[in-house]
Amino acid sequence: MDIKKLIDTLHPLERKVLPILGRVLDFNKIVEETGLKDVEVMRALQWLQNKGVVKLKDELKEVVELGKNGKRYIEQGLPEKRFLKEIEEEPKDADSIKEKASLSKEEFGVCMGVLKKNSAILIDKKDGKLIFTITPTGKKFLERTDEEDFLKKLPIELKTLKETMVFEGLRKRKDILKVQLLKIKKIEITELGKKAVKEKITDKEVVDRLTADMLKTGEWKGKKFRRYDVEINVPEIYGGKKQHYRRFLEEVREKFLELGFTECDGPIVESDFYNMDALYMPQFHSARDIHDAYYIKEPKYCKLDEKLVKKVKEAHENGYRTGSKGWGYKFDIKKTHMNLLRTHDTSISARTLSSKKLKIPGKYFQISRCFRPDVIDASHNVDFNQVGGFVIGEDLNLKHLFGLLAMFAKEFAGTDEYKIVPGYFPFTEPSAELIAKHPDLGWIELAGSGMFRPEMVKPLVGKVVPVVAWGVGIDRLAMFKLGLKDIRQLFSHDLKFLRNVKVV
């Protein structure tokens, strides 16, 4: 930047600080010479850094400072010196010394230890009292000024001090010294700054702002105004915005509602019945391994519609007049009443199918928080969100399902690279999985889907009707849309990340 133009852009605070930088780069001395407040000098230096005049660096330094007692001893003298002065002329007892030297019980004890160690006193006992007498060594000790001289030098950087023994001795005593880790501003002047300080800088003839009064009176005429630099970097302003994942979920909800779907809901603490049994998942079969659950200790069991339980029991045992033989085992009524944290959103689909409010034909969806034991990594979590639902109608078939999955990939994941492959779920036949290609993580499973089995539908609905169903891992869909590589970033509390994350 042209030096003249640079000078014309300087704020009044900068005009006071800049001329001093040619000879002083210590922050405290700049404050002292300018007469400005600390915050004003810092603001001026930051503005000058933005203009390329100086460079500011933070340095951590260990600084030795006076503690509470250290400040008091600077004024009153060290306790051991006051002790010795009281017995310099004649021996005295402990009570007399403490009173006249203004020593606390703790300070008196410390003095005894220090002076005895240095052979500065003799201790006798007379009439049950301790009598203290100064020794020739004590008189020399009284003249010693090492400790006082050291205290008067403070504050000082720890690595520069030479009086190591004095420091260590005083540091062991209560509140005389304290060592603090301080952040120090180091100021470096740039080549541009070296040129700038040579210029004649004054703030007397420069007007910083144009006021309404100046316009009314015409006082602005002939004045020199500060030049504004429109290219200078300014502090970023972080406006309020919705959390990125919450906003994405709201957009997904709006899209489903716009497509004519009805939103459903269900409890987080679910029964084994709706979470698994109503979905025609056998109670004692490896098929349940993919739905490992967190079971609730208290209350362990819940209340259910026993008529509905009986129908589902029959479906498991003999197929419930659907032409199926069922699973052919004895259904455990007690187990189906157990409470757990729902493992997938399909539990809500089961509740909706058994509801008296179900409409045929109908389209339903749910956005639900689910829980499942897992190893936490960039694409897995123990608690997660799912978007699922179903479409029920007399004329539905598998092609309708494929059309829905294609729409999910394009509308919600924003990708054209997807595959629909065969899958397995105990409650759908046929079953299919939707996988899509993430630019960084590769192919990721996004959704499980299929046609609900008659053994599941008839006990809940009362008749066999085609039902197209799906469950989408919405967390992973959000990763696609938001450009994230780690699923944990959806729930991040990192303020820096939240301020800069992409918003859909």
Image: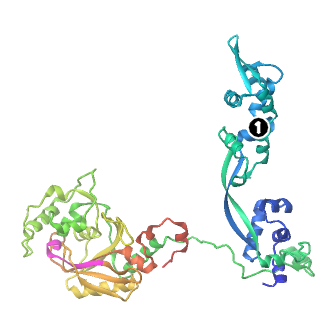
Quadrant location, the N terminus: bottom right
Residue 58: x %, y % from top left: 67, 64
- What residue sits 84% from the left and 22% below the top? 89
Kind of residue at disc 1: Tyr
Residue 263 shown left or right of residue 176 in the figure: left
Q: Is residue 453 above or below residue 120?
A: below
**Residue 503 appears in the rendering:** yes
How packed mark 1 is, by other alpha carbons closer than 10 Å (few <14, some 14-19, many 20 or more), is some
Residue 449 in the magenta stretch? The answer is yes
Instruction: Locate residue 173, reporting x and y percent.
Output: 66, 38
Along the line of sight, the residue nearer the viewer: 127 or 489: 127
- Nearer-the-camera pick, 82 or 241: 82
Identified at 39% across, 75% down, the residue is 253
Q: Can residue 355 be seen in the rendering of this structure?
A: no
Quarter holding residue 190: bottom right
Q: In this view, does 86 lie above or below 244?
A: above
The magenta stretch is 447-457
Would you say residue 405 sits in the magenta stretch?
no
Q: In this view, does 155 lie to the left or right of 211?
A: left
Q: Residue at x 25, y 76 (%)?
A: 359
Q: Residue furthest top?
A: 127
Secondary element at image label 1: helix
Indicate whether 10 appears above or below 372.
below
Residue at 81% of width from left, 27% of height from top?
85
Residue 199 is drawn in which quadrant? bottom right
User: Hey, which residue is sitting farthest front in the picture?
Assistant: 136
Residue 74, percent from left and from top: 79, 40
Residue 140 in percent (x, y) is at: 80, 32
Q: Residue under label 1, please give it.
A: 73
- Quarter of the figure with residue 210: bottom right
